[in-house]
Amino acid sequence: MKKAKLYATLVAFAFMLTSCGQSNRAANNGTEAQSNNKGQSHMIPDFNADSAYAYTAKQVSFGPRVPGTEAHQACEDWIVRKLKQWSDTVIVQPFEARTYDGVMRKGQNIIASFSPKNPNRVLLLAHWDSRPFADHDKDKSKWHDPIEAANDGASGVAVLMEMARQFHLRHPDIGVDIVLDDLEDWGPPAFDRNPGKESDWALGAQYWAHHPQVPGYSAKFGVLLDMVGAKNPTFLKEKFSMQYAAYYVNQIWNTAAGLGYDNYFPDKAGFYIDDDHIFINKIAGIPTVDIIQQDPNSSNGTFWEYWHTSHDTLDKIDKNTLKAVGQVMLTIVYNQ
């Protein structure tokens, strides 16, 4: 994922991380959740964190998934093969986009759909490529090395893959589209001292927003998962999400609190972050929420401590976090 827009409100976050421990307080086996929309009870599937962790580990096992590499192609083949086992339809959407350095590069968005004829739909997103630069590493010799991206990319994909498996076992009443976008993380590296522009990032999301798999595509709302697997994260209410999709932000955070995951999803304002959801909101016109770890106490002042470094590795992934995010998202989808 990319850059944040920091405002004077940073000081308001100083009190934020008062609790070090994260607890699992939800009763997650076959959770029955009350639907706010339908006034009826739905049996919510149990999100399997072991499964999501295995999907994270499998992506990392290919190596850095930088577009144009063998690892990228091998990971794509595996993701598509798994999604075809579970989804009603799977589309690989090839595209070309110009990166910040003026080079035209090829990408592949992966789109899995459930109940594709249902007009009442929810959009779920994550990026599946990995950063070609460890440009925030403290070791300058590693700045030009690609990263494993266990958290910044693979964790969000893994949560959505486990959700897809659950959708296959018990289709929700609503139609669901999972979009795994590519060429998300090839924005200008920090060592170039070129801040670039908003459109230098999330190239696959931009392409999809202009060219959805169905002409005139519409969804009730969207949710982007980015860096959702590290230990003891804090998912603050990202400000662009509040600007474009406040109703759904509050629905998600209230659901998390109801499940006992308010330590992961505190009722606190976050930063403005340029991420895939910006283009889904602005171009596709779908109100979209960004669930992303934010940490104003990190050395980079915004994101998880190991963001865009060589230390974004599998050992940083925590099953409790995957469980929290996945269970909240399953509850949101099945209660629509």
Image (cartoon, grey):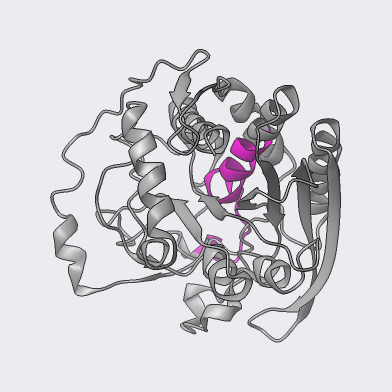
Instruction: Locate residue 254: give its quadrant.
Output: top left
Instruction: Locate residue 100: give its quadrant.
Output: bottom right
Q: Is residue 229 left or right of residue 149?
A: left
50 vs 238, nearest the viewer: 238
Q: Residue drawn at (45%, 24%), measured in percent from left and top?
A: 33
Note whether 110 is above or below 173 in the view shown: below
Note whether 248 is above or below 257 in the view shown: below
Q: Is residue 280 left or right of residue 175?
A: left
Asked if residue 232 can be seen in this view, the reply is no
Total tally of numbered discs in the picture: 0
Q: Residue drawn at (47%, 70%), measured in percent from left and top?
A: 274
Q: Is residue 153 magenta?
A: yes
The image quadrant where one finds the C terminus is top right
Note whether 155 is above or below 278 in the view shown: above
Q: Residue furthest top?
A: 29
Q: Is residue 271 magenta?
A: no
Asked if residue 168 can be seen in this view, the reply is yes
Note whether 34 is above or below 16 in the view shown: above
| Residue 237, horizontal then vertical, whole percent | 34, 54
Instruction: Locate residue 243: give its quadrant.
Output: bottom left
| Residue 304, horizontal then vertical, whole percent | 39, 51
69 vs 141, nearest the viewer: 69
Kindly report the secondary structure that dominates the magenta region of the rendered protein: helix
Q: Residue drawn at (36%, 21%), measured in percent from left and top?
A: 24
| Residue 14, horizontal then vertical, whole percent | 15, 54
Q: Residue drawn at (80%, 31%), measured in percent from left and top?
A: 86
36 vs 76, nearest the viewer: 36
The residue segment tinted magenta is 141-161
| Residue 41, horizontal then vertical, whole percent | 49, 22
Q: Residue furthest front?
A: 39
